[in-house]
Amino acid sequence: MIFLLLYLYIAKMLDKNMCRRWDGSPALPYFKSSDLGIEEKRFSFKSGKNTLYGSKYFKKGVIYRDLVVFFHGIGAGRNAYMKEISEFVKHGYLVYAYDYTGCMESEGNNIIGLGQPLKDVERFFEYLDTDENAKGLNRFAVGHSWGGYVASYSIGNEEFRIKKAVSMAGFLKPEDQYYDSAPQLKKFKIFLRLYFKNRLKNYGNVDVKETIKNTKAPFLYVQGIQDKTVPYKNNGKAIEELSRENKSIKTKIFEHRGHNIHMSNDAENYCASLLNEGLNKPNNKPELAMDIQKATVEDPRVMKCIFDFLNS
């Protein structure tokens, strides 16, 4: 009985802090595709009982170089990465991006678990196989944080036909990510693993190091040493070790960068300062507001290494 009660308490705590809907914040501005000079065509597909919504992004009249599937991180949905998506479009790629179960525009009472996007992505590629615009194009996967986890998983499934993948600060295993966020959970490993199993069965706690380790397709992992959300010592360092054995694996580690590796230092610090002041809190100061241009300046070194990798 004590075992059951303790498990239920931990499960409730984890549900409250992580397994809820992630719909962004009304206090934060987001670009629309039209703001950035690119076109958008919406699509949808089913993942279980839920309908997931996404968009194809492109430049009208452009012959596509290839296609990129862009996977978003936690907090909002694809809307949080419109600046990056637009950069891929402007480099000649047809970009597909969608919101996972329980995120932004997609259905779902909650995200179910950090492994749910692995189920979602299987349904997405079933949809992609039927899409006329995708036919004949090489497929690349790119993602940040949670999306980096999905991109890493994608490269290991031959049916997805991913030619190259990029993970920007993607975590490698949900269990370890929970421990990095809340070290006290290590005392309750048995409950955490039971929680993952109950939520998503074999998808609940997939370790993508095994996927990456054996890849024959080129894989790039990009991270900042000062990343506190997905610590380098448990993630980027592990990929660096794999790269010594598998020449298909490349890493690019930046000394003085944090988790939002795609953003400039100034942009990341600017966003962090506003959030620390309570911008996204219900009782925030009326004068607090985010300048979206200032908040989305990219790190040109990071974007260059990604495009150099995809274009090589």
Image (spheres, rainbow, N blue to C red):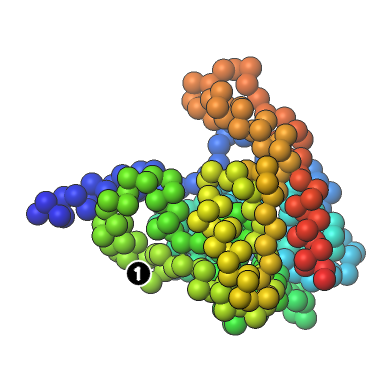
Q: Quadrant of the C terminus?
A: bottom right
- Residue 57's x, y, as percent? 75, 59
Q: Nearer the viewer, residue 50 or 11?
A: 11
Residue name at image x 22 percent, y 51 percent? 8
Q: Quadrant of residue 295?
A: top right
Can see residue 140? Answer: yes
Label 1: few (<14), some (14–19) or many (≥20) C-alpha neighbours in 10 Å? few
Residue name at image x 60 percent, y 82 percent? 158
Asked if 225 appears above or below 197 in the picture, the reply is above
- Residue 204's x, y, as percent? 39, 64
- Residue 84's x, y, as percent? 73, 51
**Tag 1 residue:** 201
Q: Residue furthest left?
A: 1
In the image, is 24 to the left or to the right of 11? Answer: right
Please, what is the three-letter code of the amino acid marked with disc 1?
Lys
In the image, is 196 to the left or to the right of 257? Answer: left
Q: Nearer the viewer, residue 128 or 269?
A: 269
Residue name at image x 84 percent, y 49 percent? 37
Q: Quadrant of the N terminus?
A: bottom left
Can see residue 41? Answer: no
- Residue 282's x, y, as percent? 49, 25
Residue name at image x 63 percent, y 21 percent? 288
Asked if 137 appears above or below 283 in the picture, the reply is below
Q: Quadrant of residue 125?
A: bottom right
At mark 1, the secondary structure is helix
Q: Nearer the viewer, residue 174 or 12?
A: 174
In the image, is 19 to the left or to the right of 40? Answer: left
Q: Nearer the viewer, residue 193 or 42?
A: 193
